[in-house]
Image (spheres, rainbow, N blue to C red):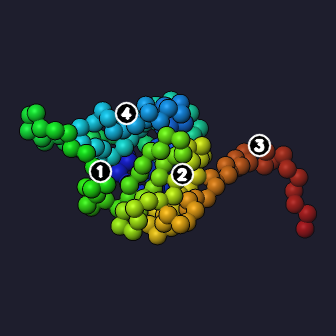
Amino acid sequence: MSITTVYPSGRLPLLLAAYQHRFAGDVEALTEYLIDRVPIGWSSLGADLLDGVPATLLDELPTARTLPGRQYDDNRAPGAPLLRVTDAATDGLDRGYVLHPDRGIEVIPLREEDIGPVVPWDTNPRSRFSDHQFLWASNRPVPVTRPPRALPHPATPATAAARPPARR
């Protein structure tokens, strides 16, 4: 499955895990990979961002990540300038994600606001982010809940057999 969602619930855990592990906290390297090396942009982000992420974390991210990311086709004429999505060219986009080197990832609900709350770089990628656009208003806190706790492993048959019978 590729990552096609641009919703915060899918995008933020991926970007946080990539920043914290593959890029070892180097936002410039992450920015170069995501923005500077591509002629137009990404149609989907993928598992290539998660190289070096521990398997235990991969298992707990909210969306399966198995295929590499896909860039938009570069249909420019030879020698034409690179095309970039900027604040002046956001038609059709619901959200913008801005990588701030010293703060984190700003999530801007583009149809509602020009700015948005910032998710700090040290946020746990296992966290659950809301996809409700109105919750990402600039005057609100980041709409996030703590990551779910790992469930205890169910008792094995041997363990269950060792328990004394229940009294009635």
Tell which circle, 1 or 2, labels the residue nearer the N-terminal end.
1
Say which mark, if any, is on residue 158: 3
Left-right relation of 64 to 71? right
The residue tagged 2 is 119
Amino acid bearing label 1: Thr
**Residue 137 in the image: above or below residue 98:** below
The residue tagged 1 is 86
Q: Quadrant of the C terminus?
A: bottom right
Give the alpha-carbon distance from disc 1 to disc 4, as whole Å. 16 Å
Q: Quadrant of residue 87?
A: bottom left
Q: Position of residue 75 (x, y in %)?
A: 13, 42
Tell which circle, 2 or 3, labels the residue nearer the N-terminal end.
2
Say which mark, if any, is on residue 50: none
Rendered residue at 48%/66% (across/down): 137
The residue tagged 4 is 32
Nearer to us of marks 1 and 4 is 1
| Residue 34 in view (yes/no) | yes
Amino acid bearing label 2: Val
Q: Position of residue 107 (x, y in %)?
A: 45, 56
Give the alpha-carbon distance from disc 3 to disc 1, as whole Å. 60 Å
Give the alpha-carbon distance from disc 4 to disc 2, as whole Å. 20 Å
Tell me how many marks there are: 4
Could you say whether the residue bearing mark 4 is in a helix, strand or loop? helix
Rendered residue at 44%/59% (across/down): 115
Nearer to us of marks 3 and 4 is 4
Could you say whether the residue bearing mark 2 is in a helix, strand or loop? strand
Nearer to us of marks 3 and 1 is 1
Specify the farthest residue to the left.
77
Give the alpha-carbon distance from disc 3 to disc 4, as whole Å. 53 Å
